[in-house]
Image: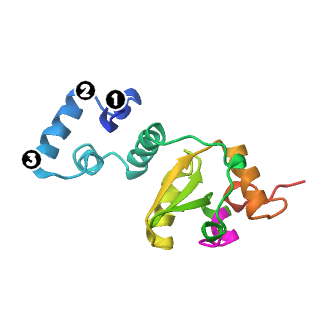
Amino acid sequence: MELRLGTILVEQGILAEDQVKAVLNVQHRTGQPFGLICEQMYDIPPTVIETAWAHQYAQRTTSVDPRLLMPQPDAIDAISRRQAWQFSVLPVQWDGRELMMATTQKHLCRALRFATNVLGTPAYFVICEPTELQEAMQMHYPMPGTTLNGRRKVA
């Protein structure tokens, strides 16, 4: 069963069921995105909508252990080491014209913004655990002492 954005917002206590119905009515009339209508009608911050969307996306996509993947060299070459660590993404393979990248649910919104605004190539994401992603990134974009988000470990 598909987890809908309205259901997630109700489960998180952000919206009530009747508010979801009101948003759906406006969406039906206008064709606007559900999250945008929530922001406009109920003054919900975009970050709250993004977090709910990331939860929804993570439920729909594949979960992987990126340490077990063998990224294609041309996928690895698509971004710099700094970008990989800054945006917490590991490019894995080209699937036609789309780049498959691994990230965590926590970093999904940031990774999507990076792919859309900086990378400029169609991308889709698979989800992994933070420690697994960090280990895989150290294998393919070595940066000793670095953790996700490019922070240095303090000894």
Residue 116 versus residue 106: which sits nearer the camera? 116
> Magenta segment range?
77-84
Q: Quadrant of the N terminus?
A: top left
Amino acid type at mark 1: Val
> In terms of secondary structure, where does tag 2 sit?
helix
Q: Is residue 33 left or right of residue 12?
A: left
Q: Name the residue tied to disc 2.
A: 17
The mark nearer the N terminus, 2 or 1, is: 1
The mark nearer the N terminus, 3 or 1, is: 1
Magenta stretch: includes residue 79: yes
Q: Name the residue tied to disc 3.
A: 29
The residue sitting at 28% across, 28% down in the picture is: 16
74 up-or-down from 35: above or below: below
Q: CA distance from mark 2 to mark 1?
A: 7 Å
Q: Is residue 116 left or right of residue 144?
A: left
Amino acid type at mark 2: Glu
Badge 1 crowding class, 10 Å Cα cut-off, few under 14, some 14 to 19, many 20 or more, is some
Label 3 vs label 2, nearer the camera? 3
- Number of marks in the image? 3
The residue sitting at 74% across, 62% down in the picture is: 140
Q: Position of residue 116 (x, y in %)?
A: 44, 66
Name the mark on residue 10: 1
The residue sitting at 12% across, 51% down in the picture is: 30
